[in-house]
Amino acid sequence: MTIQKDKVVTMHYHLTNSDDGQVLDSSQGNEPLTYLHGTGSIIPGLERQLNGLDVGATKTVQVAAAEAYGEYDEEMVQTLPREEFAGIDTLEVGMQLHAQDQDGNAFNVHITQINGNEVVIDGNHPLAGMPLTFEIEVVAIRDATAEELQHGHAHGEGGHHHH
């Protein structure tokens, strides 16, 4: 059985920054990642290059920033007065916050700088603008259940759990 749309794939991965080799994430020593292929639940550049692989396959996949977490967008960076964060007692660089745009859409930002009464927030994904290298090993492939297809994600071990 090979990886294709509507298959539930379990894989180990080791993720590094293609530019400097910095380790960004890894499933080594942890549970492998399980996802439903063809639903966009992993980054597009990686998902496309996994098509057709078999159980036991290993592959090194290079993904350009545009096909990973997007190019870095300077317009997503804002400097706000500290009063905007009145409900938060302690602000720290690296802190993740939930924000809303004018239309009420929720998104995440992280604090990149605090200069006196000015707080710089960045709405880009922390890995935006970064070319990525994935070393992957396919552990298992199975057909998705009807419920998984309906929900659009894998259930059970390493997948999505409903509570």
Image (cartoon, rainbow, N blue to C red):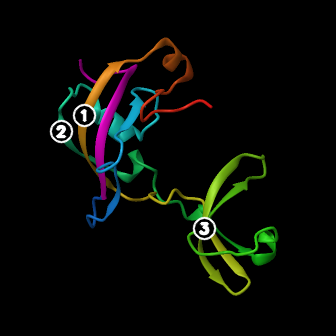
| Disc 1 + disc 2, Cβ < 8 Å | yes
| Picture quadrant where residue 13 is located | top left
Which portion, as a residue range, is magenta?
1-16
Residue occupying the point 62% across, 75% down: 92
**Between residues 85 and 56, which one lies in front from this camera angle?**
56
Classify residue 52 as left or right of residue 103: left
Q: Is residue 40 magenta?
A: no
Residue 138's tag is 1
Q: Is residue 12 magenta?
A: yes
| Picture quadrant where residue 161 is located | top right
Disc 2 to disc 3, C-alpha distance: 35 Å
Q: Amino acid at mark 2?
A: Thr
Q: Which residue is mark 3?
A: 95
Q: Residues within 10 Å of mark 2 (few under 14, many from 20)?
A: some
- Position of residue 148 relative to residue 46, above or below, is above
**Which mark is first along the chain, 3 or 2?**
2
Q: Which residue is mark 2?
A: 58
Residue occupying the point 33% across, 19% down: 142
**Which mark is first along the chain, 2 or 1?**
2
Residue 125's tag is none
